Amino acid sequence: MKNLIISIIILLALALGIKVLTFSEDPNDAIKNNYSLNYKKEYKIFSPPLPTHLNFCGEPVPLDTFYVSEQLDREILVNTYWHSNTLLLFKRANRWLPVIEPILKEYGIPDD
């Protein structure tokens, strides 16, 4: 009988301890929530709007096709926010454009 009472007291103490630890509120949660709200409010990186009509080499670009608009959106985002890649493309253009320009001119392809 004595062992049963001790077992019940231990179980009640464990249950009370679990309840206190489980339902206690971390004071850092309020700080984390406030930080999250401020982060969402102050976030400044957005996707630039896609044009409604676009021509490339005199041909209309089919922006109503989903994969074309997705690929265009990706390229605009990459070239807008990935500055290192943009600088690398400028460097490569300066390296290869003098080689390619005479070939394009020879075949009558416009500079754009």
Image (cartoon, grey):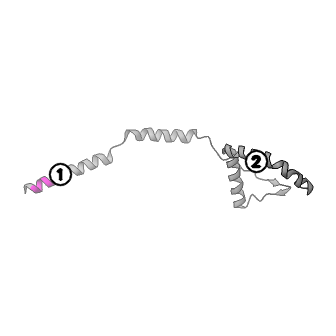
- Residue beneath disc 1: 10
Q: Magenta segment, which residues? A: 3-12
Mark 1 or mark 2: whose residue is earlier in sequence: 1
SS at mark 1 in the image: helix
Residue furthest toward the left?
1
User: Residue 30: within the magenta?
Assistant: no
Asked whether, in this view, residue 61 is left or right of residue 80, the answer is: right
The answer to whether mark 1 and mark 2 are in CB contact below 8 A is no
Between 50 and 58, the residue placed more toward the observer is 58
Type of amino acid at the residue the image marks with label 2: Arg
Q: Please indicate, yes or no, whether residue 48 appears anywhere in the rendered image.
A: no
Quadrant location of the N terminus in the rendered image: bottom left
User: Which residue is disc 2 drawn over?
Assistant: 92
Residue 29 placement (x, y as % from top left): 41, 41
What distance separates the C-alpha of mark 1 from that of mark 2?
73 Å
Q: Could you tell whether 94 is left or right of 40 in the image?
A: right
User: Vertically, is 55 above or below 83?
Assistant: below
State the residue at coordinates (82%, 54%). Answer: 55
Whether residue 101 sits left or right of residue 67 in the image: it is: right
Judged from the image, the secondary structure of the residue bearing numbered disc 2 is helix
Q: Nearer the viewer, residue 7 or 91?
A: 91
Above or below: residue 54 compared with residue 34 = below
Q: Which of labels 1 and 2 is toward the front?
A: 2
- Tell me where residue 15 appears, x and y as whole percent: 24, 51
* Type of amino acid at the residue the image marks with label 1: Ile
Q: Residue at x 27, y 50 (%)?
A: 18
> Looking at the image, which residue is at 62% across and 43% down?
45
